[in-house]
Amino acid sequence: MATYTTKQQKAVLDCLSERADSPVSAAAIVDALREQGERIGIATVYRQLEKLERQGSVHKVTTDEGAYYQFCTHGCASDCCLFKCERCGRIVHLDCHQLAPLYEHLEHEHGFSINPRKTMFYGLCRECQEGA
């Protein structure tokens, strides 16, 4: 089924793809688009982000500070997840096939089905480990 991309949806997606290395808030997207001359409101940005998340183009990252969105750079498989560095705050989106057995174990042995797209692991990124 083909999906129709509106000018506003393309603008939101382009804004996120330009900032693919880190999650961005909806308010920051509005500010960036307005600086580029786009007339767009926060409600429209949220609607577009929801659509893009359903399509798998964007990840929603929820933290203690609020919701952030990140462009999906590799087209998500069912076993992607997010990692957040507890030292620098960096969030990395990974597609790791080694997690599939863990998800299967949790479902079969413990009756709990994981939503990998909403799963976040916490630890230290490589740079922070090396700098420790």
Image (tube, rainbow, N blue to C red):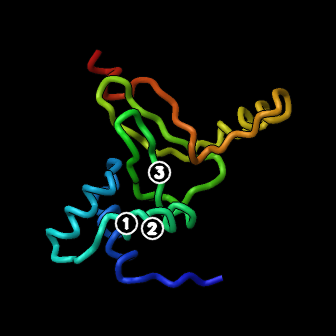
Whichever of labels 3 and 2 marks the residue nearer the N terminus, that label is: 2
Q: Amino acid at mark 3?
A: Lys
Mark 2 touches mark 1? (CB < 8 Å): yes
Measured from the top left, where is residue 42 in percent x and y?
32, 64
Q: Which of labels 3 and 2 is toward the front?
A: 2
Residues under labels 3 and 1: Cα distance?
16 Å
Badge number at residue 63: none
Badge number at residue 60: 3
Which residue is disc 2 drawn over?
A: 47
Total labels drawn: 3
Mark 3 touches mark 2? (CB < 8 Å): no
Measured from the top left, where is residue 24 in percent x and y?
32, 51
Looking at the image, residue 58 lies above or below residue 64: below
Secondary structure at badge 2 equals helix
Secondary structure at badge 3 equals strand
Q: Amino acid at mark 2?
A: Arg
Residue occupying the point 27% across, 73% down? 40
Measured from the top left, where is residue 38 in percent x and y?
22, 77
Residue occupying the point 29% across, 15% down? 132
Q: Quadrant of the N terminus?
A: bottom right
Task: Tell me where residue 130 sits by quadrant.
Answer: top left
Residue occupying the point 34% across, 36% down? 65
Left or right of 104? Residue 116 is left
Badge number at residue 43: 1
Q: Amino acid at mark 1?
A: Ala
